Image (cartoon, grey):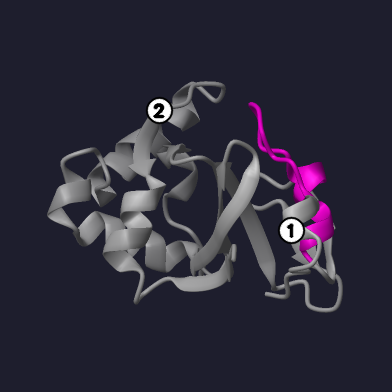
Amino acid sequence: MRLDEKRIPTLNVAGNGGKEKTLAPMFSGYTYVNEPLYDFQNIEDSTDMIEAKKQADCQWFDLGKYHNLPAHQRQIKMTFILHKEGVIDCVFYIPLGDMLDLLCSDPDYRKHGWTQENIEVCAALKRSYPSMQVKVKLGVRGFYKKYQNTLKTAYIAS
């Protein structure tokens, strides 16, 4: 993943919503696509995809979307853009499949609903009620602190 680090400090990501269009300038060589599992796709390599998650800390995930992902979707870069009052202070990422495996194997996260069984149940509910979302919380800063050596840090504000 290539980030335009000079652009990042100029972006204001305060407020609700994903801000994908605001974030687009920081992803050099990617185009905004707004697919169900990812927001950006590499212009030269269509298998290189980014899902952008912009939060101050707490992020909610609609787990039903993540059941039985094929190999290419497990490689989507789940990219967390952390900010303080709209100023980006950290960007890190992990392949989606690795993130799911990590969270579903950690007892601390399992007790909050990060389990393969829950993902399967949420997917079944989503099939029966397509507009329904069942969300599970992730404290992103705590996740980063706990797994910093496993996650790929792309940017830290100076």
Q: Secondary structure at mark 2?
A: loop
Q: Which residues make up the magenta segment?
A: 11-27
**In the rendered image of this protein, does residue 68 appear above or below residue 110?**
below
**In the rendered image of this protein, does residue 36 appear above or below residue 151?**
above
| Quadrant that contains the N terminus | bottom right
Q: Which residue is at a point 27% across and 40% down the rendered structure image?
A: 118
Residue topped by disc 2: 134
**In the rendered image of this protein, does residue 35 appear above or below residue 154?**
above
CA distance separating discs 1 and 2 = 32 Å
**Three-letter amino acid code at disc 2?**
Val
Q: Which mark is residue 8?
A: 1
Where is residue 85? Give x, y as percent: 59, 36
Q: Residue 122, located in which quarter of the rendered image?
A: top left
Q: Secondary structure at mark 1?
A: helix
Q: Which residue is at a point 52% across and 65% down the rendered structure image?
A: 93
Horizontal side of 68 relative to 38 (left or right) equals left
Q: Which residue is at a point 48% across and 74% down the rendered structure image?
A: 152
Query: Does residue 37 show up?
Result: no
